[in-house]
Image (tube, helix red, strand yellow):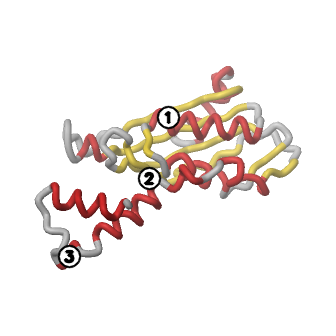
Amino acid sequence: MLKGIYKNLLTEIGENPEREGLVKTPERMEKSMRFLTSGYRMDPSHVVRDALFTEDCDDMVIVKDIDLFSLCEHHMLPFYGKAHVAYLPDGKVLGLSKIPRLLEVYARRLQVQERLTNQVANALMEILQPKGVAVVIEALHLCMAMRGVEKQNSVTITSAMLGTFKSDSRTRQEFLALIGK
């Protein structure tokens, strides 16, 4: 179904979908869109289910500089950047690779950066039940760079601080120092 929509889209913008370079474009666009929005078909708790481990650890765990790519829900143009995620364990730790996977669940949906930041933080809080969670995302939005205000080097930074990261300024400052902010 998407293939037909994309073929019509090419016609609507003034292209010939039968032109050699465009014949397979509707099929490629459909595959691309299904991949870029695959987060709708993922369950966050399923992504992390076998990677929760009981551990006597209460020191901060940080995974920083996680590459992220998402689509702005307002213009369906990409935004991309880095995410920095931390938590303070309370008897359980999460396999480290699951943090980027959890981010992908939400990034592979039509998004706004503010919601994405909060969704990752809230999911970790719910799944791990740690003492606190912190998420900072820095991203470049092509909807700002390619159109509109056309500011190519503007970086948007969002943060979500939950639990101890919100209530204890020393914990928050330690996290921000460790990620270089």
**Whole-percent x and y of residue 95?**
73, 55
Q: Residues within 10 Å of mark 1 (few under 14, many from 20)?
A: some
Amino acid found under the numbered disc labelled 2: Phe
**Whole-percent x and y of residue 136?**
53, 38
> Left of 164 or right of it: where is 144?
left
Counting residues from the N terminus, which is met first, the one under dot 3 or under dot 2? Answer: 3
In this orientation, which residue lies closer to the viewer: 67 or 38? 38
| Residue furthest to the bottom | 20
The CA span between labels 2 and 1 is 14 Å
Decide: marks 2, 1 in contact (CB < 8 A)? no
Q: Closer to the camera: disc 3 or disc 2? A: 3
> Left of 158 or right of it: where is 103?
right
- Which quadrant of the rendered structure holds the N terminus? bottom left
In this orientation, which residue lies closer to the viewer: 124 or 74? 74
Name the mark on residue 21.
3
> Left of 63 or right of it: where is 114?
left
Amino acid found under the numbered disc labelled 3: Gly
Of helix, strand and loop, which one carries label 3? helix
Identify the residue at image location x=18%, y=79%: 20
Of helix, strand and loop, which one carries label 2? strand
Identify the residue at image location x=79%, y=57%: 50
Residue where numbered disc 2 is placed: 69
Counting residues from the N terminus, which is met first, the one under dot 2 or under dot 1? Answer: 2
Identify the residue at image location x=70%, y=26%: 163
Amino acid found under the numbered disc labelled 1: Arg
Identify the residue at image location x=80%, y=51%: 52
The CA span between labels 1 and 3 is 37 Å
Residue where numbered disc 1 is placed: 115
| Residue furthest to the left | 14
- Please determine whether, in this image, residue 85 is positioned above or below residue 4: above
